[in-house]
Image (cartoon, rainbow, N blue to C red):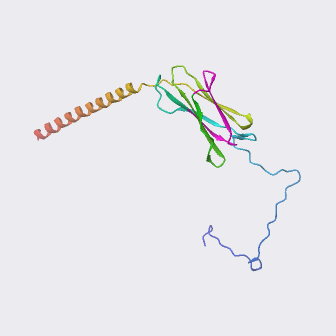
Amino acid sequence: MPPGNRSFRLPRRTAGRRLKRVPKKRPAGVAPLRRPPPPSESRFGRIPQVEIFTLRPLVLGQPNVLVCSARNIFPPVARIRWAFQGQELTQGVSSTPVFPVQELDFQIFSYVEMTPREGDIYSCTVKGLGGKFDTMAYWAPKDPVASKLLENVLCGLAVAVGGVFIIVGVVLLALSFRFRSSD
């Protein structure tokens, strides 16, 4: 029999009887080992993970909606506040109820209507139960490329690449005819 495939039989006297499990004794003064909590947890609850993004592609001067997503909320109670340039926002703000994502993991979304301009700074603050931890995320518009400009640039690149392939094709065709006629 190969060394890794060993089988064995219980001695006759223990066959059919239940074996008693003998608890291991700890030396006096030694506490049982406890696993440390994951980094996102503490004895006061979990630290929410917050992310801000736009609902539609960013175009400066066009109305849009900012979304604040807060995850890793436990217990499932949270308050979300929005601020614009450091001043709290109350108009145009809405939130979803807290809903479960995985076991003991909850998520909430909050929305604010806005028209982005250069230099705007929005913040979303999530306060968990007990108020021990506040998690804040910031959003500022990045230098967006105007969508019409992007469309025009991509169209121009496609035409240029197509033109190069046409020229290469005509040159290869002419060379193949030249070699055939010389034979």
Name the residue furthest right: 28
The image position of residue 11, as x and y in percent, is 74, 77
Left or right? Give the position of 182 relative to 66.
left
Q: Quadrant of the C terminus?
A: top left
Which residue corresponds to the image point at 26% horizontal and 34% vertical from the top-left?
165
Against 35, is 18 above or below? below
Q: Is residue 79 in the magenta section?
A: yes
Left or right? Give the position of 128 relative to 66.
right
Task: Please tell me in which quadrant of the rendered image residue 26 appears.
Answer: bottom right
Which residue corresponds to the image point at 22% horizontal and 36% vertical from the top-left?
169
The image position of residue 61, as x and y in percent, is 47, 22
The image position of residue 129, as x and y in percent, is 72, 38
Q: Which residues are magenta?
A: 67-91
Task: Please tell me in which quadrant of the rendered image residue 152 appears.
Answer: top left
Q: Is residue 111 in the magenta section?
A: no
Which residue corresponds to the image point at 66% horizontal and 47% vertical from the top-left?
104
Question: How many numbered tags mark residues here?
Answer: 0
In-front residue for pair 154/68 = 68
The image position of residue 31, as x and y in percent, is 83, 50
Which residue corresponds to the image point at 77% horizontal and 73% vertical from the top-left?
18
Name the residue furthest bottom: 12
In-front residue for pair 17/167 = 17
Left or right? Give the position of 55 relative to 167.
right
Main structural element of the magenta stretch: helix, strand or loop? strand
Name the residue furthest top: 119
Left or right? Give the position of 27 relative to 44.
right
Q: Quadrant of the N terminus?
A: bottom right
Against 112, is 31 above or below? below
